[in-house]
Image: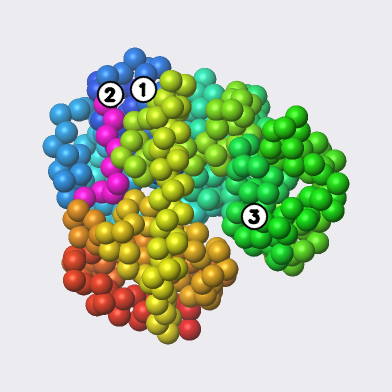
Amino acid sequence: MDADAAIHRRLTADLEKAACAVRSAEDVLVITHIDADGIASGGIASATLSRLGKRYRIVFEKKISEDTVDMINGSAENTVWICDLGSAYLSEFKRPGIVITDHHVPDPKWKGGQTSIDDFDRIHHLNPHEYGMSGSYDVSGAGMTYLLSKTVDPENKDLAYLAVVGAVGDLQDNRESRLIGFNRMILQEAVSTGDLAVDEDIRYFGRDYRPLIQFLQYGNDPPIPGVSDNGPGCNALFSGLGIPLRKGGELRTWRDLTADERRSVSCRLLSLVDDDQKKRLFGEIYTITRYDSCTGLKDVKEFATVLNSCGRYDDAETGLRICMGDMTALEDAERNRSDHRKHISSAISYIKENRLLRERRFVQYFDAGPEIKETVVGIVAGMLLNSGDVNKVLPIFAFAEADDGVKVSARASRALTDRGLDLSFIMKTASEIVGGYGGGHKVAAGATIPTGKEEEFLDIVEDLVSSQII
């Protein structure tokens, strides 16, 4: 407990220093990522600065590139606040007045390059890895941004629900089928403000809008024998339990079921899977109380998907508007979400129909070329890994064309990371050897490499994977 208390004291002290920098800033450049965690982070930072009356502008970035580093170092703003990005490039930042709230693995060269106390004050770096916590499940980028926001002003507790959206969008609740660590504390604060409700239920996606058959048929993790991808099987399950699919002529959703009906279906589903799958199938679900089901924002998973679909389709600003409470943005967001669903579905079909998935001894991979957007190829890889149609014993690497080379996304099962696999280290190391850059988390990471270096990259990756898990 003494070690934990010391870590918490150090985090509290660092938060206070960064909060002082934000409060005293004349104007601020906010740079944040385009995924759900990044957009939620941007929403928290924007609300924090607006409430302080600060002048600021916000820029969304897919990744930290050389151009991004130049923009940060050359910014005319007094302060640069980097959310859900930046930790992997600490040694590249040369200016004072930088605040980073991130959760990705930090740049190992940074500490070695510091030579004076002033170097430590130049960058306020708030990252769970610096305090002995995991950036994969203890707290997300939005969570670190929220902790700073709440330190700036305790009244900002009403932004806690956005940090939960960011964490769930980053799949940080998947490890235990519930949020843990600092995420748990943030969740409890969102509940205390009345913004969130916590229940235990089936954790499939689409409880507010998918008809009952589709809710079970297309639930992707874990797959249920006789139910997943089996419309007649789903129909037979509901029929056997005496649960009508319609009410007043309208198709019912999971949210429309009574508590007894949900309990009956849940018990039946849980009886069809093993103990490990039970833990993934049934657990906590989080509901945002301020929104109606018709908005598509009531379920935290669905809110996160709305943000993701905006960012992945070059419209992160619409996601930010929603985070800031602008409900006029919902129409644009729904168009993004529809496009997102269609693209993901067609991408998975394209990979399967063209048999693009290849296996080496220690890895599996596919190269989508220009057919899948670089911003969603990681989502596709993750869905394939959880679909039951690929080898879960191997990590999966996905390639797609990008404006500045080839985007590579990697995903792995928890079982592999528990055996020592660290995709963040692998992607950073392999990409730098071939002239690119990368990083991320142990279980999910990304990189950009030069065109034509794919095979060399895979050779290096395979050597690194084999050294970690054999």
Task: Answer with the quarter of the image where residue 184 lies.
Answer: top right
| Horizontal and vertical percent position of residue 425 | 37, 66
- Say which of 311 and 362 sits in front: 311
| Amino acid found under the numbered disc labelled 2 | Tyr
| Horizontal and vertical percent position of residue 38 | 39, 40
- Say which of 333 and 198 sits in front: 333
Image marks 2 and 1: residues in contact by CB distance under 8 Å: yes
**Can residue 96 be seen by looking at this rendering?**
yes
Chief SS of the magenta region: strand
Q: Earlier in the sequence, mark 2 or mark 1?
A: 1
- Say which of 111 and 46 sits in front: 46
Q: Secondary structure at mark 2?
A: strand
Q: Among all residues in the image, which is located at the extreme front? A: 249
In the image: residue 408, left or right of residue 127: left
Highlighted range, magenta: 56-65
Residue mark closest to the camera, 3 vs 1: 3
| Horizontal and vertical percent position of residue 364 | 42, 75
The residue depicted at 39 percent of the width and 70 percent of the height is 354
Rendered position, 115 above or below 470: above
Residue that numbered label 2 is attached to:
56
Q: Earlier in the sequence, mark 2 or mark 3?
A: 2
Q: Earlier in the sequence, mark 3 or mark 1?
A: 1
Q: Secondary structure at mark 3?
A: helix
Task: Using the image, tell me which numbered label, if any, was put on residue 49.
Answer: 1
The residue depicted at 30 percent of the width and 80 percent of the height is 459
